[in-house]
């Protein structure tokens, strides 16, 4: 298939791996920020092809994983209401709140629907004027423009039965939180290509300079990731720390101005709590005051819910790259994709789920 | 004797932490296996059921018979490439074929929601008639029930089937041997993607058609041609990956599969890329895997390729010598990974 097969070519991959071996003279720790990259790395076994000493640690770039449990509980409460059609992207449905998940709410009679786009949720609102359609607006800068567009459209059409439960998060503040933490081991970063497609990469230039780490904007196919690693390690070996763009076929320095504009007109930057990590300032998006009547929190006046995480779950440390899934005592035993203790096990982009699926319950299955 | 034998309905294990049945309990993945193993198997335990085949094979007065049943609850009722009627006939015919049987007779039970258009029912009956004729089976007994509006979703169909198994045919996971070649009859994922594309909430434009068809003819030809068929399995819910993992576990054999040899048509690949799905887990309704000895590979492929429904038959892997029941996939890029069953249905990803 065009534009896919070229980036999964075995002979090319071998050439990139050789180039990586040539350029690498000592151990390096590199974080890939995005869960989509983590998934590709484990799925294709890329980490096993790297030169000895090059270690990949997995970043917080899975929106499903970092959505706080309190917000999931709010979603469960909303979805259980008889007047509500609760719409969500597919992989939020299995994420455990403190009591059950959206699939359980659906089984108990809640009207929970998987949509592929917020526009589909908007269409449901138009078609069911007697019901309240709530869309679970989860995601990074990648999903924010479409969600903003849905709200913008709903406002233009004066739809009074459409709201968002917003849990948007932003990548650069989280990357900064990781780089500025004491004990940070990360020496280089692969930035998430699709986030940069929307936002551009100017924000990362400040980070690279301030923390002296090379940051490479990287795509999601196996060859993208190998090339991104090559560019990152080449900088490290040469003592450089700047932003480079591997994903040139998609990303421009300024991003997508139209997408940024619609985001900025509908959303404002707010502090946001990340599951397992805690509150990070200026790391989330919420609706601007002029669009607040599309906020499900206000429409349904749901009370703030406080919930406790399972104390054994180390997903917070995993999301910050401080631990790997097999280092968790519950991994593959008490915690599996059927019975996840934390969200890194439940989302297909979560590091724990990726290890479990492609490496087995011990998480250590090397090349078989 | 265990306590289970004395009280077969007693469940020795905690059922699951779910107090309600979820969609995933019928999704062909781990939750469904758990439901069967923990709830149904203890209740109905017997040696034939314990084999967990697509159907049961037994002798009645010296004649070997295969017996199977399946229920069809597809939404929408009509989709490109077929409808609930063609599925209800072909699905059960294929389950019989996977036992190495010649399908003979089917039953059909209809559960109809009050208010269903008569023309719809007529169209479905017409499809069933045609599918039965093509598969050379007869619908010889049936049942009709109508339920109140809202108590069922338009139309559910159950079919059961009986087939005849020749004496020298021994097909099942226990027959799978080290060194066996793994053959597939066609490309994967077409039925599942067709249904997904039709569903209201995921509507996207596509020209994909379901591969819904009877595979009895190529299977019978395979058996008649002298190929020693060790095992057969049709790829339904859970797709190729789930079928192989199930067989690997049941046979306690390691299976090594080459990703680049598994055909996926461009429309299915494209849609899977967009939705974040793995085509190896997407359903088929007219595709199967066959395990045959190395020496029979060429003959088996030429027999299969002779039939339109399996003209793209291909060898995709080999049964290894390892005793661990697992499936290893060699990725196109050269890495390897363990293939696992999913918990339930695949869910489209966020980004």
Image: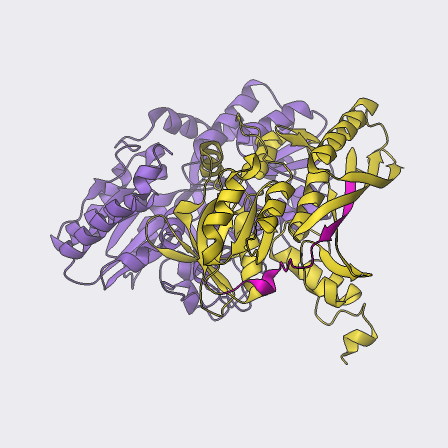
> Which segment did they paint magenta?
B157-177
Question: What hue represents chain A?
Answer: purple
Query: Which quarter of the rendering shows the N terminus of chain A?
Result: top left
Q: Position of residue A137 (x, y in %)?
A: 52, 38
Q: Is residue B218 left or right of residue B115?
A: left
Q: Position of residue B11 (x, y in %)?
A: 76, 69
Image quadrant assignment for residue A7: top left
Outermost residue on the bottom side: it is B1
* Picture residue at 69% right of the left edge, 59% below the top: B167
Q: Position of residue A245 (x, y in %)?
A: 23, 39
Report if residue A301 is visible in the image: yes
Q: Is residue B116 left or right of residue A64?
A: right
Q: Position of residue A220 (x, y in %)?
A: 35, 43
Question: What hue represents chain B?
Answer: yellow
Outermost residue on the left side: it is A238
* Picture residue at 22% right of the left edge, 60% below the top: A51
How many numbered discs, if any?
A: 0
Q: Check residue B170 for magenta coloring.
A: yes
Query: Which quarter of the rendering shows the C terminus of chain A?
Result: bottom left
């Amino acid at each position: 298939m065009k534009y896919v097969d070229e980036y999964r070519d075995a002979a090319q991959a071998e050439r990139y791996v050789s180039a990586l071996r040539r350029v690498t003279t000592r151990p390096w720790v590199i974080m890939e920020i995005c869960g989509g990259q983590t998934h590709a790395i484990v799925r294709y076994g890329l980490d096993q092809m790297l030169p000895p000493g090059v270690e990949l640690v997995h970043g917080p770039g899975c929106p499903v994983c970092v959505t706080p449990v309190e917000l999931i509980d709010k979603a469960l409460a909303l979805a259980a209401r008889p007047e509500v059609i609760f719409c969500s992207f597919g992989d939020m449905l299995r994420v455990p709140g403190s009591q059950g998940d959206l699939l359980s709410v659906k089984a108990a009679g809640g009207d929970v629907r998987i949509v592929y786009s917020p526009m589909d949720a908007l269409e449901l609102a138009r078609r069911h004027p007697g019901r309240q359609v709530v869309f679970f607006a989860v995601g990074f800068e990648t999903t924010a423009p479409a969600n903003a567009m849905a709200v913008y459209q709903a406002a233009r059409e004066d739809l009074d039965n459409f709201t968002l439960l917003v849990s948007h998060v932003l990548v650069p503040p989280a990357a900064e939180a990781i780089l500025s933490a004491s004990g940070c081991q990360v020496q280089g970063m692969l930035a998430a290509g699709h986030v940069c497609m929307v936002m551009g990469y100017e924000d990362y230039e400040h980070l690279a300079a301030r923390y002296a780490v090379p940051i490479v904007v990287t795509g999601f196919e196996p060859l993208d990731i190998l090339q991104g690693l090559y560019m990152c390690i080449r900088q490290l070996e040469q003592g450089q720390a700047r932003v480079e763009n591997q994903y040139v076929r998609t990303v421009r320095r300024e991003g997508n101005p139209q997408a940024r504009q619609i985001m900025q007109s509908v959303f404002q930057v707010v502090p946001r709590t990340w599951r397992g990590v805690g509150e990070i300032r200026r790391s989330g998006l919420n609706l601007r005051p002029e669009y607040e009547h599309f906020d499900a929190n206000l429409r349904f006046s749901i009370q703030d819910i406080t919930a406790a995480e399972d104390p054994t779950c180390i997903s917070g440390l995993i999301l910050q790259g401080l631990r790997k899934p097999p280092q968790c005592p519950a991994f593959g035993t008490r915690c599996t994709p059927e019975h996840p203790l934390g969200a890194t096990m439940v989302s297909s982009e979560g590091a724990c789920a990726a290890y479990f699926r492609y490496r087995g319950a011990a998480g250590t299955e090397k090349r078989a | 004797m265990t306590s289970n034998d004395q009280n077969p309905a007693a469940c020795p294990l905690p059922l699951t932490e779910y107090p309600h049945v979820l969609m995933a309990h019928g999704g062909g993945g781990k939750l469904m296996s758990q439901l069967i193993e923990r709830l149904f198997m203890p209740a109905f335990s017997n040696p034939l059921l314990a084999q967990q085949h697509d159907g049961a094979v037994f002798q009645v007065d010296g004649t070997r018979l295969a017996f199977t049943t399946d229920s069809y609850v597809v939404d929408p009722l009509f989709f490109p490439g077929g409808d609930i009627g063609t599925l209800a006939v072909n699905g059960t015919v294929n389950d019989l074929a996977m036992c190495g049987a010649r399908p003979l007779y089917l039953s059909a039970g209809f559960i109809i929601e009050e208010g269903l258009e008569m023309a719809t029912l007529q169209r479905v009956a017409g499809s069933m008639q045609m599918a039965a004729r093509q598969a050379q089976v007869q619908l010889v007994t049936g049942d009709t029930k109508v339920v109140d509006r809202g108590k069922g979703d338009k139309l559910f169909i159950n079919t059961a089937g009986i087939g005849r198994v020749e004496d020298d045919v021994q097909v099942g996971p226990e027959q799978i041997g080290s060194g066996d070649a793994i053959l597939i009859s066609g490309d994967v994922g077409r039925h599942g993607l067709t249904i997904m594309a039709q569903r209201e909430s995921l509507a996207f434009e596509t020209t994909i058609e379901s591969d819904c068809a009877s595979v009895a003819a190529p299977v019978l030809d395979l058996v008649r041609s002298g190929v020693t068929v060790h095992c057969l399995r049709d790829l339904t819910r859970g797709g190729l990956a789930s079928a192989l993992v199930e067989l690997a576990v049941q046979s306690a054999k390691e299976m090594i599969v080459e990703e680049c040899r598994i055909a996926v048509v461009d429309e299915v690949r494209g849609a899977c890329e967009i939705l974040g799905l793995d085509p190896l887990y997407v359903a088929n309704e007219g595709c199967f895997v066959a395990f045959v000895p190395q020496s029979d590979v060429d003959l088996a492929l030429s027999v299969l390729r002779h039939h339109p429904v399996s003209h793209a038959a291909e060898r995709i892997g080999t049964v290894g010598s390892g005793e661990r029941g697992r499936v290893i996939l060699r990725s196109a890029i050269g890495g390897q990974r363990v293939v696992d069953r999913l918990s339930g249905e695949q869910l489209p990803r966020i980004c």
